[in-house]
Image: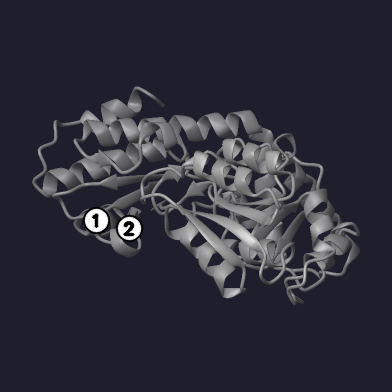
Amino acid sequence: MLMIPGPTPVPEKVLLAMAQRPIGHRSGDFSKIIAEINEGLKWLHQSTNEVLSLTVSGTGAMEAGIINFLSPGDHVLVGVNGKFGDRWAQISETFGLNTTRITAEWGQPLDTEEFRSYLEADSNKEIKAVIVTHSETSTGVLNDLETINKYVKAHGEALIIVDAVTSLGAYNVPIDDWGLDVVASGSQKGYMIPPGLGFICVSDKAWKAYETAKFPRFYMDLGKYKKANLKASSPFTPPVNLMYGLRVSLQMMQRESLESIFSRHQRLTNATRAAVKALGLKLFAADDCASTAVTAVDPSPISAEDIRKIMSSKYNIALAGGQDHLKGKIFRIGHLGFVSDRDILAGIACLEATLMELGHDVKPKAGVKAAAALV
């Protein structure tokens, strides 16, 4: 049972769809599938812009989102308050961008006022992009993308490039209403399919920047993907069977509705966090900046790895560990994608039993009762 922030559980309908024989990716039948997927992706992204599908991970989607709209030496602001914000800063630095890191302690949200200060002081409009991780998967923090984006819009020149890998499909991200320029995500998260596809939604403003961007690119050239998208095709060989699954998962999401998807994720987040508190453990991120994809827990003085080991070996439940300097210090509970109330209650019950086995003072059924009151 996967209770990690990715890969996430895959519905049986999706697995069965992917078990079909592949067909030619240049055939008329597959073009119909692409056309349906493209419309479903626009619905999920709440955008009329083209949503491009690349055979990459979320990291590949973010790299493509950076190199297609910027040029060597461009000044960018990158929010860094976890593993993935740090990764986007590293990518920016690797490609020779003039990178200013706006940092916060891991577990704390980015300070929106720091972005405002930099952007308002940039009278020469030298800042070309602001790169933000919306849901910082490594710590369970949801950054205030809406406010940061308002400051970017007030600047006028800069693009906003967003890592929505664990927020898209779990939290309301109205791309067109907010005017987001480049939004990247990955298939193994809220999309409820296995890893292998990255998605990028691109605004008209970003496409204008694409025309003068100077980084070399070929496979990652998003212009090729846009041109193919408009013909219900793909510039290169796509993962045919994965796209079979994507079509079904998008159909499932449309039947559930965006409103219901977002409310379900918020409900499961609230239940998980209430249970963690009732079990006497510490939440790594505060309630007012909690991701709806993953909850990070500091179980000290109990070893996070001991908890994960028992949960895996005895109950067949996978929890995520900490990353970098947080390795062994926290564990993370994923509640993203194809996850139900029952899954959370089962996971919390097993966590409660694990804590008791490790000698933690737990009032019997405290966690389950706290979670059950909110699902």
Q: Is residue 265 left or right of residue 320?
A: right
Name the residue beneath numbered marker 2: 322
Q: Are marks 2 and 1 in contact (CB under 8 Å)?
A: yes
In the depicted view, which residue is nearer to us: 16 or 53? 53
The coloring applied to the image is one colour
Relative image position of residue 123 (x, y in whole percent)? 68, 48
Residue at figure coordinates x 43%, y 59% from the top left: 83
What's the CA distance linking mark 2 and mark 1? 6 Å
Q: Quick one: SS at disc 2?
A: loop
What amino acid is at disc 1?
Lys
Q: Picture coordinates of residue 38 (x, y %)? A: 79, 51
Q: Is residue 28 left or right of residue 326?
A: right
Residue closest to the eye, 362 or 71: 71
Residue drawn at x 78%, y 49% as measured from the top left: 203
Picture coordinates of residue 52, whole percent (x, y):
75, 58
Screen quadrant of the C terminus? top left
Q: SS for tag 1?
A: loop
